[in-house]
Image: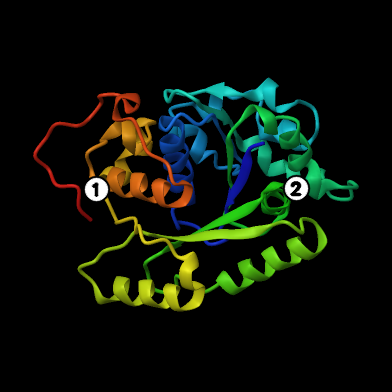
Amino acid sequence: MSKIIAICNQKGGTGKTTSAINLATYLASAGKKVLLIDLDPQANTTSGLGISKHNIKKSTYHILLEELGIKEILQTTAVENLYLAPSNLDLTGAEVELVGVLGREHRLKKALLKEKENFDVMIIDSPPSLGLLTINALTAADSVLIPVQCEYYALEGLTQLVNTIKLVRENLNPELTIEGVILTMADFRTNLTKEVIQEARNCFKEKVYEAVIPRSIRLSEAPSFGKPIALYDKNSIGAQKYEELTQEIFGLTFSAAKLGNETRLDNSQDGS
């Protein structure tokens, strides 16, 4: 039976999609069969894997409306063992269309349970909100990964997210746990980054992972080429840190041969 992990933070720009794509990629490279679910109407996970959201006719929208099953919308990706349940703008209407529908919070869970034996890990990329889409993700998930950017006001709003997780646990999904906290967009040249890291560790203790994702030009560029960082530049610091993070979360080792050879060969630095 697979593990279902939701990546959530109602604040935008925290690295949810980047983390979802790259954790899924490294899991797949370790030989795990992975399903990545794009539950954000912006569909950045879909486009970040090189699939045009404008050409998607069957999406997670149809899953939530129970018009199609997961198998009917699955897309293969450039990464072996990694499959995508894509999104598109249709998903913006799902919350309105499901108002008043009995059991609307369980729609995604019902669909994923039918496929749980077919995948080792399922990762849900949630939208930057605490609406019905995110509630569906939390209701379906076994655990939650929370990305937190190393910037001013980073921890503001996390109390609301933690309270939402608690309410979901009490009313919809009693098994839900916090898997851990991912620190992203770190610039170690600044005192602010160090302060946010320390504050996060004070708040969440051992739930904060040791691997910290840096602010990186390569990580920023990769989605525009429709590639995870492991395919865009597997030797970059961003790639190294996401590999370390995946090892830390899941305790896996990786085969570099499975990540392809599309490494950028230039003399520019992978910095902030």
Quadrant hosting residue 14: bottom left
Residue 126 appears anywhere in the view: no
- Residue of label 2: 95
Query: Measured from the top left, where is residue 174 in percent x and y?
Result: 77, 59
- Compared to residue 86, the image places residue 8 above or below, namely below
Q: Disc 2 to disc 1, how far (Cα)?
A: 38 Å
Mark 1 is on which residue type?
A: Ile
Query: Measured from the top left, where is residue 73 in percent x and y?
Result: 65, 24
> Where residue 171 is drawn, which disc sits there?
none
- Compared to residue 202, the image places residue 242 above or below, namely above
Query: Measured from the top left, where is residue 242 in percent x and y?
Result: 36, 47
Which residue corresponds to the image point at 31% horizontal and 50% vertical from the top-left?
241
Which residue corresponds to the image point at 23% horizontal and 43% vertical from the top-left?
236
In terms of secondary structure, where does tag 1 sit? helix
Quadrant hosting residue 154: bottom left
- Residue of label 1: 237
Tag 2–tag 1 contact (CB < 8 Å): no
Mark 2 surroundings: few (<14), some (14-19) or many (≥20) residues within 10 A: some
